[in-house]
Amino acid sequence: MPIAAALAYLPMILVAATAVAVMLGIAWRREHAVTVAVTVLGLGLALIAQAFAWRVIPVHTPLLDLDGLALLAGILILASTLACAILSHAYLESFHGAREEFYILLLCAATGGLVLAASSHLASLFIGLELLSMPLYGMLAYAFHEQRSLEAGIKYLILSAVASAFLLFGMALLYAQTGDLRLDVLMGSLSQDTGAWGLAGIGLMLVGLGFKLSVVPFHLWTPDVYEGGPGPATTFLATASKVAVFMLLLRLMLSMPVLQGEWLRGVLTGLALASMLVGNLLALTQSNLKRILGYSSVAHFGYLLIVLVVADGLAAETGGVYLITYVLSTLAAFGVVILISSTAGGEDAAGLHYYRGLFWRRPYLTAVLTVAMLSLAGIPATVGFIGKFYLIALGVEAQRWWLVGGIIVGSAIGLYYYLRVTITLFLAQPGMRRRDASDDWGTRAGGLFVLALAGW
Amino acid sequence: MILVWLIVIPFLGGLLCWQMERLGDRPTRSIALVTMLIELLISLWLWARLDFQLPALDGTATQWALEYQVAWIQRFGISFHLALDGLSLVLIALTAFLGVLAVLCSWNEIVRRIGFFHLNLLWILAGVTGVFLAIDLFLFFFFWELMLVPMYFLIALWGHSGSKGQTRIGAATKFFIYTQASGLLMLVSILGLVFAHHASTGEYSFSYQVLLETTLSPTLSRWLMLGFFIAFAVKLPVVPLHGWLPDAHAQAPTAGSVDLAGILLKTAAYGMMRFALPLFPEASQAFAPIAMGLGLLGIYYGAVLACGQQNVKRFIAYTSIAHMGFVLIGIYSGSALALQGVVVLMLAHAFSAAGLFILSGQLYERCIPGSLEKWAVCGIGWAACPGSGCFLSPPRWAYRSQPTLSVSSWCCSAPFPRHPGWW
């Protein structure tokens, strides 16, 4: 293997090796803190290796195509996995049962995400997607003595399997049409003659990937799974997993001219508008913070689909910037939820009533959550605004007025529930049931991490 | 540099208040008061020192009395560009003065979470000062949106929950959604303008001066102008878009109402005069009859609805709508005299509305809250008076509305040594 390719593969190799190391370590001796330390170390090294990989890109191998976008996706995935690992430490401390296996699952899923985001072959695409999804079933059902966690895991398993079936069927049709599995060759021969099978194949693959992104109408699993899954697992699902799938789609759209036909743009525009509106509207009446974040992610990926519709000019930059801002805000929001939930066992403290008057007990955690909410709403002076600014700029430049209108209406509706969460934090009401982060949350790694996120 | 200080001082003062809360009430309030007094002194000092004559028309002089610029986001040609001229200075001095009043009038009214209250109050004032100073369109939008969040908290946390199921949080949310959504429309317009400029010259710029030169097709110009107009019309407010105002006023604490009526409404008029008219002169001229019609509608609508109000603050809110109708007509009438009158009327309205809100707040403190409903509203007939139709001699209608403002009639007769030279 040439040295450049080896260097570009190094992050994946490191993450996979860490997974193996953690597994062997657990077989030898169970020690939560050590497991976390090894995981964090491995992910940190992989991040550093990713920085070295910047020098050798683009690297093209038969299965993977490591270009700038794939590397950016890699950095985002690794960083959010790192965040999940650190937060899991706080979360699992009070967990009754085996804690260490969670990190193996986390590392495997991260490897899958890295492969998926860089894939240039239908085989690597499918392997990456499954490697990303399979550990997630386990992670979501990790607190299996909680009914909701189990429900979330099984729901995700079944629906994900259906989506995979759609995806495989689509791949089979594409193969039938073109006789090739390499994406660039395949799309090249499609551009001469798309054919009915080719169209159907692309459509079916879109369904499969749209399920993972939870765009409307494939979003039905989102709120339940978000609500039921343990905090760190949901965080991973909301950040790393979605980033990987979206980056794959973005890379495909930018590099394959055949995907930029008007019909596909029309379909994507419809999906985008539906996601923005439905996601925001359904979030309005929720009273569970994790469900709200779930619907909010539906809406955010609706906004992000604009990047795929335009796929031109500023699009790559916009996609990257928006994903970064989305990941930062989502991590900060979930980080606070995890820290609040971490003291007692049982379900996560995600009901809004737990957060009532939080400001007067935990001013700094509240500040973080406030900033995260305002950032998701796209208010200036937060990172979220930069992302929204880019998206609107992109829409205006490409003169997609419907989508720009969708963003405006969606944001206006979204404000309602983001503000509702925010104001709840500041309302004092004596005699409320208290559930709180442990007193030394700030000295723990997770707490420091959440504060650092807000500093962005 | 002093322009930056004008924004930074209230901002820092707010942070200081927040942290000083642990020392007790009095230091917190004093810090807020001192901050606003410093701000006021700086603006008065600038007023005395600087030259606000109209620039010579030889094309060499800049129109600004004071300017500050550093590059910010070079990728899009955005710079941190502040500038001061007569119009901004008058409004900043007004902001500082009303800031002092707002701190004073909440001295006894606000007793809970004082530090956080003053943080929000001072940050609103910092944001508004930024709006009056920014002449980079991105920066302007940034400050425009920035002042919403503290205002939201002010209404939602310290407001009065009104009758008939109207909660302060509902009012605050309504305020926020109205202004934020229309703000996004303005952002779309700004970006449309920037990209039109990019298409013709090949470079990105958000600078006011540069964008003034942009050539636009009439259709595009009309749509972009509408984006700006709607954003400002919501904030002004112009009648079909006024829904948030009575609720926000009725539920806000006194200091919030003072800021809202005194300053926040003025940012909209300022925006129209500074941005909407000069950036799209032809489109605005074509739109003028509609805008003036809306203004006229607002005058009657506000006045008629004010008659039926049982709540003093709602009553003042509706009369504000009527007064802003006059401002709108003045802005779109296209005569220099009318624009001068608009400035005078804005100042007069700010002082008198602030005075009225403070009075009603004081009365509210002294009476049992329920009796507010029965408070006689007929004494102050300030809504009906300006309806006498002297539309084209604005200084006169500013004058006419003034004696009716029994509360603070002193304000408007303050001598105006120089006309602000801002066109």
Image (spheres, coloured by chain):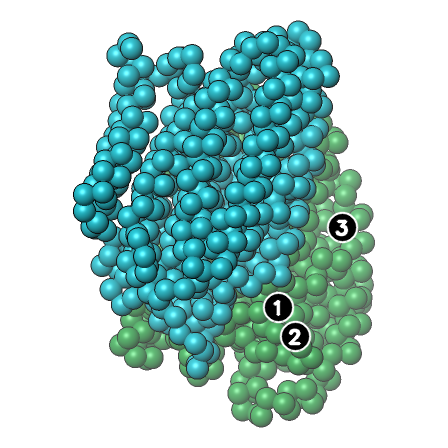
Chain colours: A cyan, B green
Pick whichever, A248 or B277, lies toward us. A248
Q: Amino acid at mark 1?
A: Ala
Task: Give me the chain letter of mark 2.
Answer: B
The local secondary structure at tag 2 comes to loop
Q: Residue at 57% of width from left, 78% of height from top?
A: B160
| Label 3 packing within 10 angstroms: few (<14), some (14-19), many (20+) | many
The 10 Å Cα crowd at callout 1, few under 14, some 14 to 19, many 20 or more, is many
User: Could you tell whether A193 is left or right of A109 in the image?
Assistant: right
Instruction: Say which residue label 2 marks.
Output: B166
Residue highlighted by disc 3: B291
Label whose residue precedes the other's in the sequence (1 or 2): 2
- The reply to whether residue B351 is in sight is no
Expressed as whole percent of the image width and height from the top left, the position of residue B413 reads: 58, 70
Residue at image mark 1? B171
What residue type is disc 3 on? Answer: Ala
Q: Is residue A360 visible?
A: yes
Q: Chain of mark 3?
A: B
Q: Position of residue A21 (x, y in %)?
A: 23, 35
